[in-house]
Amino acid sequence: MQGHSFDVARHGYVNMLPGDARPGTADTAAMVDARARFLEAGHFKSVADEVAASAWRVGRAEYVVEAGAGTGYYLAETVDVLNARAGLALDISKYACRRAARAHPRIGAAVCDVWAGLPVRSGSTSLALSVFAPRNGSELRRILRPDGALIVVTPAREHLQEIVGPLGLLSVDEHKASRLDQTLGGHFELADTRRHESFMSLDRDEVRILASMGPSARHVSEEELAIRAAALAEPIVVTISVDIGTYRPRSSEGA
């Protein structure tokens, strides 16, 4: 980019945002820390396994890109299972990229705004991931090879249903399916979709951490979350329910 230079931060990631960028939607250090603690405890390991299994069914990929990668948890699992040469974690949060850069020896990380464009060469990768993340359909299509694939994970209506009400969390958008089609439909066609459901047995502190790692953390204070979590009876059985879709690039966009 003319007039800009991008340096590798001492924490191991590259910041691709221009100097005047205002990443107001980026996950905070506290949100990223909560996510790292929860994921490292293995509570969403079944989801990571399903993402990697979907990637395995697609076929070998030397390079894997995840847009909105967070801490790189799902990307690391996929790179490992595929024995991919390299993975690239993209996220607007520098705190997330700091974690992602250390998630796997073959993963690099870059801070960028997915809506402003992905810092990846066109047609350079055969596999892209979008796990609980915003989806820029045109950019994801641009970076994929014609025979590539995009794996998308979105929450189903039952996801975390036991704690949504008691903790005041954001519920799943009832128009999620139509919004997903609007975002990807002109660029991709759905090749396969699977519903994954499992259950977690959590204590009050784990429930509080789970609530703190997502967008609901912007709407309910830590103090209020702690109060609401303390009122729950342990153990707290919480549903994991997600849809995992595998998409193929359209040969002619918009067709």
Image (spheres, rainbow, N blue to C red):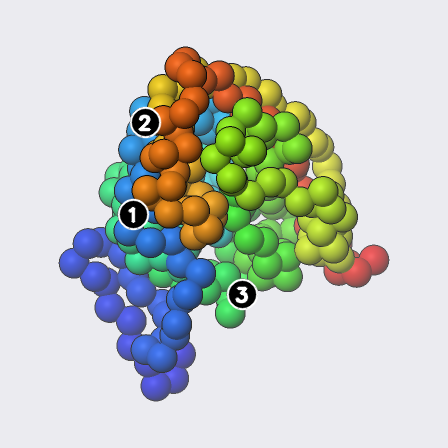
Q: What whole-number distance in Å separates the C-alpha atoms at marks 1 and 3?
A: 24 Å
- In what element is the residue under mark 1? helix
What residue is disc 1 on?
30
Q: Which residue is mark 3?
A: 115
Nearer-the-camera pick, 158 or 63: 158
Q: Is residue 87 visible?
A: no
Tag 1–tag 3 contact (CB < 8 Å): no
First-in-chain label (1 vs 3): 1
State the residue in front, 104 or 165. Answer: 165
- Where is 232 relative to 73, above or below? above
Specify the amino acid type for callout 3: Trp
Mark 2 packing: few (<14 Cα in 10 Å), some, or many (20+)? few
Quadrant in which the C terminus is drawn: bottom right
Q: Are marks 2 and 3 in contact (CB under 8 Å)?
A: no
CA distance for labels 2 and 3:
35 Å
In the rendered structure, the answer to whether residue 164 lies left or right of residue 207 reads: right
Between discs 2 and 1, the one toward the N terminus: 1
Which element is circle 3 on? loop
Amino acid bearing label 2: Asp
Q: Which residue is mark 2?
A: 205
Q: Quadrant of the N terminus?
A: bottom left
Q: Earlier in the sequence, mark 2 or mark 3?
A: 3
